[in-house]
Image: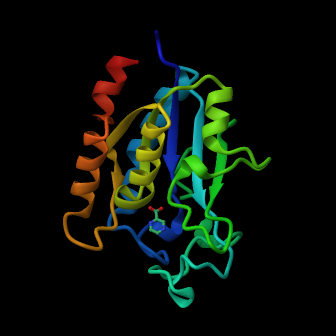
Amino acid sequence: MQRRAALLVIDVQLDFCPGGALPVPDGDQVVLPLNHYLELFTMRSVPVFASRDWHPEQSKHFKAQGGIWPPHCVQGSPGADFHPGLRLPEGTIVISKGMSSWDNGYSAMQGVTENGTPLSMLLRRMDLDRLYVGGLATDYCVKESVLEALNEGFAVTVLTDAIRGVDVNPGDSERALREMLDAGAGQATLPSVRSAL
Ligand code: VGL
């Protein structure tokens, strides 16, 4: 049976871009390829979801409270904004995650709409069962979202030209991609997606 696709853009927020609070090396380099995907998918009426890290000021995710990260993507702060170059189409459904003080919020599947509906539930309700995934960061939120989506039975394609990783340890992103592929994800770049759609 033909699967119904959605595009999931993960955490392309200023704090994850150069100059931000938790910059992913070359994080802003995902904007251009993602804009191509956004245009392509929108032309084919594929629904777009954009997740964002949306933390409270006090979070166990942050160093001061025992976590491993500097404060970033605090709700309503400028660093939590999507990169201004990212051309999210009208109708993009924003998914917020990491909103409670005890929640790392790595997986977008556990993020919620403004009405509080979890992404995984919404996808099922909309009869969407194939996800194309790009964004930040390969070795954290992209990886966790992809693995959880696969676990929940979604077909997942990682857009390898539209992801970048933190690489706290050298090679983390490469290992993360390998883990996603081993778990059953596919991988694609713009030319192959363009001809497959
Ligand atoms: C992320 C590190 C810390 C991500 C979020 O969006 O991948 N990475 N918090």
Can you see residue 76?
Answer: yes
Q: Camera-side residue: 193 or 2?
A: 2
Q: Residue at x 42, y 44 (%)?
A: 146
Q: Residue at x 31, y 40 (%)?
A: 183
Query: Is residue 45 placed above or below 102 in the rendered structure?
Result: above
Query: Is residue 80 placed above or below 178 in the rendered structure?
Result: below
Q: Quadrant of residue 65?
A: bottom right
Instruction: From the top left corner, tell me how far across and down residue 155 is, in percent.
Output: 42, 29
Residue projecting furthest to the top: 1
Please tell me how many numbered marks the rendered image carries.
0
Residue projecting furthest to the right: 115
Task: Give the quarter of the figure containing the C terminus.
Answer: top left
How is the model colour-coded? rainbow
User: 139 left or right of 64?
Assistant: left
Q: Camera-side residue: 93 or 119?
A: 119
Instruction: From the top left corner, tell me how far across and down residue 10 is, in percent.
Output: 50, 51
Instruction: From the top left corner, tell me how far across and down residue 121 is, in percent.
Output: 66, 37
Instruction: From the top left corner, tell me how far across and down residue 132 is, in percent.
Output: 44, 34
Query: Is residue 8 placed above or below 166 in the rendered structure?
Result: above
Can you see residue 89?
Answer: no
Q: Residue at x 47, y 11 (%)?
A: 2
User: 79 left or right of 170?
Assistant: right
